[in-house]
Amino acid sequence: MPWSTRLFGKNYTFFSIKEILAKASEEKSGDIFAGIAAENNAERVAAKRVLAELTLKDLRENPVIPYEEDEVTRVIDDGLSQGIYKSICSMTVAELREWILSHDTTCEDIHRVSAGLTAEMVSAVAKLMSNMDLVYAASKIHVVTKNRTEIGLPGTLSYRIQPNHPNDSVEGILASVMEGLTYGSGDAVIGINPNEDTVENTVKLMNASFDFMMDWAIPTQNCVLSHITTQMKAVEAGARVCAFFQSISGSETCNKVFGISAKMLDEAFDMIKKKGFAPGPNFMYFETGQGSELSLDAHHGADMQTLEARTYGFGRRYMPFMVNNVSGFIGPETLYDGKQITRASLEDHFMGKLLGLPMGMAPCYTNHVKVDQNDQEGAIMLLAMAGANYYMGVPGSDDCMLSYQDTSYHDDATLRELLGRRPAPEFEKWLEKMGIMKDGRLTPIAGDPSIFATMTPLGRR
């Protein structure tokens, strides 16, 4: 059935909910490139007006990719709490927005309702929010997870050390890890992107990072970001690791290009739970970001934001320890400039938390997009106010292996001080034992990795 509205003396008609969702999106180069974006701001406002009056039932019954055709749709719909859904299905999108933003609605209220929301509902309500709305709404939602240690507690801000090396040198990687630790980074995870995706190399990096953690009694977790099948073979070969990583998406077609399925991830989740080196209960590390489906021609005519929400709906099946959003990583063909990257990052952070995921943010950029360091710093400050669980820690902001710009160890330390946030509690105690931090502030030895050459390891020997 068509949906219509009249605005400024002009009639607007939309022929599907997929079209309404796409045209209600804020301007993004990827949606324009796909030919599904609003032609102008007037049509965008008309689409938002129609969207506001749809019920949550309308959105569940009209997923952007049909249930019969797509595994992601089935995973999301089959996992819905029917009781909670029935209690909210008559709400309009506008009413859901007002409820979330109400002073009286708590974190616990939102977590309860979350189990009855589909990705299309979450995307729809985010489209009716301004940037400040997205920051305010997300700041209410705390998602705490535990692998070896716990992250996401109120008042904390954690970091992943990303010690990538162009030829996977263990010595180079550990030198980068030591530098990051001395800036107070690393309480989220020590996560290595390998250059060479082989079982032998993955085993080597998993064991080297795990043994370093044990030698120095560091309360954190390790992960090597090979393909999930490579990681599984590495664990079968006896590698020591705490969490499994995988990129995921919002359509079955795109997941097939990634070489994954729900069945495969089910097997991986079961393996890391039984054979990993952490008690959990959260074992998975997912990476996502608007535009992956578009860049792989797997978007089915749906907008990037809604597909990203579907990614989170798919991911919550596995109760992940961390979800890292890298909107901006692909390039200007999906997000053109700093304004679009900031907007997408705020949408993704809110949508992920609304669906119960522990969102870490990386408003990063490649060197051919219209964005600079100031744009990135503006985005990370907004996302920190919104309550992001963690950020990346990259030496000098410049990833020498993946060749893109992300947040540095210096950014991380500044954000904590600026917003009065602390490391994860166990990690802060370790920093104090090492003399790197005192009373929540870095000491004069911060940033000097040579302390690892002069101090006695705190762990096993």
Image (spheres, rainbow, N blue to C red):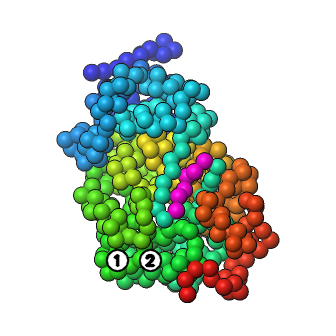
| The magenta stretch spans residue 72 | no
Q: Which residue is mark 2?
A: 206
- What residue do we see at 53% from left, 54% from top? 360
Residue 451 in the image: x percent, y percent?
A: 71, 81
- What residue do we see at 40% from left, 47% from top? 312
- What residue do we see at 67% from left, 56% from top? 422
**Mark linked to residue 234:** 1
**SS state under label 1:** helix
Question: Quadrant of the rendered structure where residue 310 is?
Answer: top left
**SS state under label 2:** helix
Left or right placement of residue 159 versus residue 320 in this view: right
Left or right placement of residue 369 versus residue 251 in this view: right
Q: Earlier in the sequence, mark 2 or mark 1?
A: 2
The segment highlighted magenta reads 149-154
| The magenta stretch spans residue 153 | yes
Quarter of the image where the N terminus is located: top left
